[in-house]
């Protein structure tokens, strides 16, 4: 349904998106997970026709977004990261207008507008102006305007940013409803828990490159059952590294060194809590000092940490 | 084009929410126009008062007083007799243009050709009327000098006359005066210089000055509204709706056409209201209303498109708004909104007519003062339509080249 092949977007020497490829199928949610500035929005802008890719291809429902852009866009519904609403037109008029922009007319349009109003929970506020709405209500209307024309492919660009928990839960319900109705959804986020809840499969993107891709379970399995242990304090770099290597040689074979700075080291190993005394002893033997310990079970966020050596939300 | 109609309705619905802007676009030009009309359009000639203190109360002093209100001069100046104290006070209070004091013994002194001083005090806060009074006074003094040169003997004889002169003496003096006039007449009538009087071609009736201001005032409203409506592109960009528009397949043309149609209606409404008020005030034939309205609506779309294209070239709304506003007022000035092109010096008027709004105002002036309706030539219509097409094309190019993205 949505296919991206070797897609790149450069701004002069700066490579915003670097040869990324993925595909998303009908009735699934495909997540694009990455920190701010990773290239998620640029990817969506290339697919939606807002930006011309520098190289590579993307197609929507079999239509190339460059060569057959009009047909491709006709099959797309985009919910942009920033609100895109006429604040001085009633909510229902916003939906009607964008429905007409995609060719809906007459009873079909009215039926669809009414369904969307109920879906986004604004049935009783249909005639009110969005400028009188709360942030969450505006987000919901923004979502509604993107799906009013029943698009087979929906691009959601960080739709939950700035949304209160109640509206976020509603948004998830709406995404799942569209997926269940057969839509193919590309969902970008930098919230790991959103990706874990909503996405059937996902890709992790950083500095414009895809660094991992698969189903949530497949990605989790890359970590195995290993925990992520992060120690903060003061650590002599070389001596600490040698001490950790010595631990590996003494039988802790799944212990892996992920990142080290003077004030923190990050390790991954299975059943880390049982090995904490040995690790503390090794660090103390180098003259290092631990002031804070963080132990996390395997999840997408720790996978990102494992792959990039940095936090997802940095 | 269905989407053009949809976009047109959408923009009109949005403008209905912003009625205050429309009110401002109409009221400012009307206020300025009202002030200008009040100043220029009343057709009341300036009129001054000359206060006269006649301490002599002789036949000659009466003659002097009467000289200020002879013929056309009487339409400009009224002579009021007063006392010296009151006259000085009234001139100082600015109630009169001047105060002429004819001293006692003026008549006697004139007849005896003795020096005499007339005192003229003028109002320093006025320029034109005191100047006229001063000039008339100097002419009267010159006339007295020449009367002495020509009729000195007769004046002496009159002075020597008794209170009840004999008819024969009066008749003899009349004959003498007549002879002198006849002797001078060949030098004066006809003049020695041969003067060929060339009749100028009959001048076209000049429209009243206040009427010449009307097109400029209407164009002021059109310029305000077209600049204001043009800023909606930036507003839509800030709302993010232009970005959403680009996502939609093939609707850019309809969107732009809808915006142009809405601009035509809003600008036509603003210009139309000022037009109707102007037509009512000046009693212009209503037959010219449709053509004038159509002209300003189409021209308004052209101006809107150019303002929009200009604003869309800048990287942020603030700069776009400042540049657009900075450009607006010199254009209004050059285009005849503050001074009609017809009364400006030729080269300045030529520059004004070359400005977009000056071009439109010039044709609107022709339409208003022409004997019949639809007097604007076809080429002018084509020029504004082409101007609108070019401006809208630039807007479309900017939408496609990244303006919608931010």
Image (tube, coloured by chain):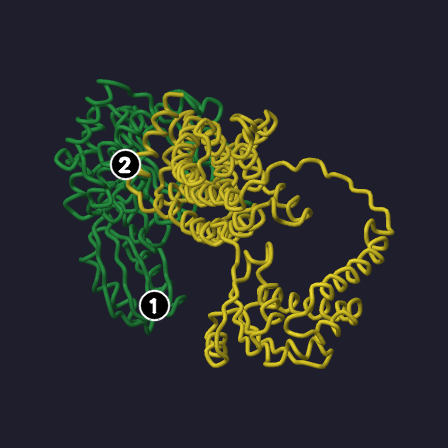
Chain colours: A green, B yellow
On what subunit does the disc labeled 2 rest? A
Residue B380 seen: yes
Are the residues under badges 1 and 2 in a single subunit? yes
Report the disc number at residue B364: none
Between B250 and B128, the residue placed more toward the observer is B128
Instruction: From the viewer's perspective, tell me whether residue B49 is left or right of residue A105.
Output: right
Instruction: From the viewer's perspective, tell me whether residue B158 is left or right of residue A246.
Output: right
Instruction: From the viewer's perspective, tell me whether residue A137 is left or right of residue A7.
Output: left
Report the disc number at residue A263: 1
Name the residue tied to disc 2: A218
Q: Quadrant of the C terminus of chain B?
A: top left
Between B184 and B226, the residue placed more toward the observer is B184
Residue at left offset 21%, top offset 57%: A295
Q: Residues within 10 Å of mark 2 (few under 14, many from 20)?
A: some
Between A5 and B205, the residue placed more toward the observer is B205
Q: Earlier in the sequence, mark 1 or mark 2?
A: 2
* Outermost residue, top side: A107
Which secondary structure lies at badge 1? loop
Residue A217 seen: no
Q: Where B356 falls versus B175 (above or below)?
A: above
Q: Quadrant of residue A291?
A: bottom left
Between A51 and A259, the residue placed more toward the observer is A51
Q: CA distance from mark 1 to mark 2?
A: 32 Å
- Please provide percent x and percent y for residue A182: 24, 23
- Please provide percent x and percent y for residue B28: 40, 50
Q: Quadrant of the N terminus of chain B?
A: top left
Q: Where A158 falls versus B325 (above or below)?
A: above
């Amino acid at each position: 349904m949505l296919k991206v092949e070797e897609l790149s977007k450069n701004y002069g020497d700066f490579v915003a998106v670097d040869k990324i490829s993925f595909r998303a199928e009908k009735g699934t949610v495909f997540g694009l997970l990455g920190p701010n500035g990773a290239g998620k929005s640029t990817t969506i802008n290339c697919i939606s026709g807002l930006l011309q890719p520098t190289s590579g291809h993307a197609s929507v429902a079999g239509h190339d977004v460059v060569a057959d852009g009009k047909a491709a866009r006709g099959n797309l519904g985009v919910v942009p990261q920033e609100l895109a609403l006429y604040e001085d037109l009633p909510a229902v008029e916003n939906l009607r207008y964008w429905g007409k922009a995609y060719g809906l007319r007459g009873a079909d349009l009215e039926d669809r507008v009414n369904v969307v109003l109920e879906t986004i929970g604004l049935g009783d506020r249909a005639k009110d102006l969005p400028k009188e709405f709360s942030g969450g209500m505006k987000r919901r209307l923004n979502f509604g305007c993107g799906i009013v024309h029943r698009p087979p492919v929906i691009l959601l660009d960080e739709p939950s940013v700035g949304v209160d928990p109640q509206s976020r839960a509603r948004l998830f319900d709406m995404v799942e409803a569209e997926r269940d109705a057969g839509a193919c959804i590309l969902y970008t986020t930098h919230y790991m828990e959103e990706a874990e809840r909503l996405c059937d499969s996902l890709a992790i993107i950083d500095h414009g490159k895809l660094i991992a891709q698969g189903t949530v379970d497949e990605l989790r399995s890359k970590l195995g059952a290993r925990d992520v242990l992060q120690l903060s304090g003061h650590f002599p770099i070389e001596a600490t590294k040698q001490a950790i290597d010595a631990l590996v040689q003494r039988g802790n074979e799944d212990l892996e060194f992920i990142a080290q700075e003077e004030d923190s080291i990050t390790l991954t190993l299975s059943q880390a809590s049982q090995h904490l005394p040995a690790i503390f002893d090794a660090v103390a033997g180098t003259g290092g000092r631990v002031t804070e310990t963080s132990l996390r079970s395997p999840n997408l966020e720790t996978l990102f940490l494992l792959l990039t050596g940095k936090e997802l939300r940095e | 084009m269905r989407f053009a109609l949809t976009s047109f309705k959408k923009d009109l619905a949005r403008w209905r929410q912003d009625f205050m802007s429309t009110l401002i676009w109409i009221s400012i030009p009307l206020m300025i126009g009202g002030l200008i009309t009040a100043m220029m359009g009343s057709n009341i000639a300036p009129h001054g008062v000359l206060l006269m203190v006649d301490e002599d109360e002789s036949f000659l002093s009466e003659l002097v007083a009467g000289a200020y209100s002879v013929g056309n001069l009487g339409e400009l100046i009224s002579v009021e007799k007063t006392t010296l104290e009151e006259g000085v006070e009234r001139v100082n209070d600015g109630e009169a243009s001047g105060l002429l004091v004819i001293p006692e013994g003026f008549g006697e002194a004139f007849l005896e050709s003795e020096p005499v001083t007339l005192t003229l005090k003028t109002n320093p806060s006025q320029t034109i009327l005191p100047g006229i009074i001063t000039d008339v006074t100097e002419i009267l003094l010159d006339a007295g000098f020449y009367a002495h040169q020509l009729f000195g003997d007769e004046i002496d004889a009159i002075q020597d006359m008794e209170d009840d002169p004999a008819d024969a003496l009066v008749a003899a003096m009349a004959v003498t005066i007549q002879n002198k006039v006849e002797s001078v007449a060949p030098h004066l009538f006809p003049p020695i210089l041969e003067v060929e009087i060339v009749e100028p071609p009959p001048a076209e009736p000049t429209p009243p000055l206040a009427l010449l201001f009307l097109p400029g005032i209407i164009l002021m409203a059109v310029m305000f509204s077209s600049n204001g409506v043009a800023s909606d592109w930036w507003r839509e960009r800030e709302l993010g709706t232009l970005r959403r528009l680009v996502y939609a397949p093939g609707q850019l043309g309809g969107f732009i056409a809808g915006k142009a149609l809405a601009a035509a209606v809003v600008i036509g409404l603003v210009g139309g209201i000022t037009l109707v008020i102007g037509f009512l005030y000046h009693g212009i034939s209503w037959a010219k209303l449709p053509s004038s309205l159509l002209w300003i609506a189409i021209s308004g779309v052209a101006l809107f498109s150019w303002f929009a294209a200009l604003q869309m070239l800048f990287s942020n709304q603030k700069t776009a708004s400042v540049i657009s506003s900075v450009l607006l007022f010199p254009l209004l000035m050059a285009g005849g909104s503050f001074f009609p092109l017809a009364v400006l010096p030729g080269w300045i008027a030529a520059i004004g007519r070359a400005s977009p709004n000056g071009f439109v105002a010039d044709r609107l002036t022709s339409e208003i003062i022409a004997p019949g309706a639809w007097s604007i030539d076809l080429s002018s219509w084509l020029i504004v339509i082409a101007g609108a097409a070019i401006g809208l094309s630039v807007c479309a190019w900017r939408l496609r080249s990244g303006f919608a993205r931010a």
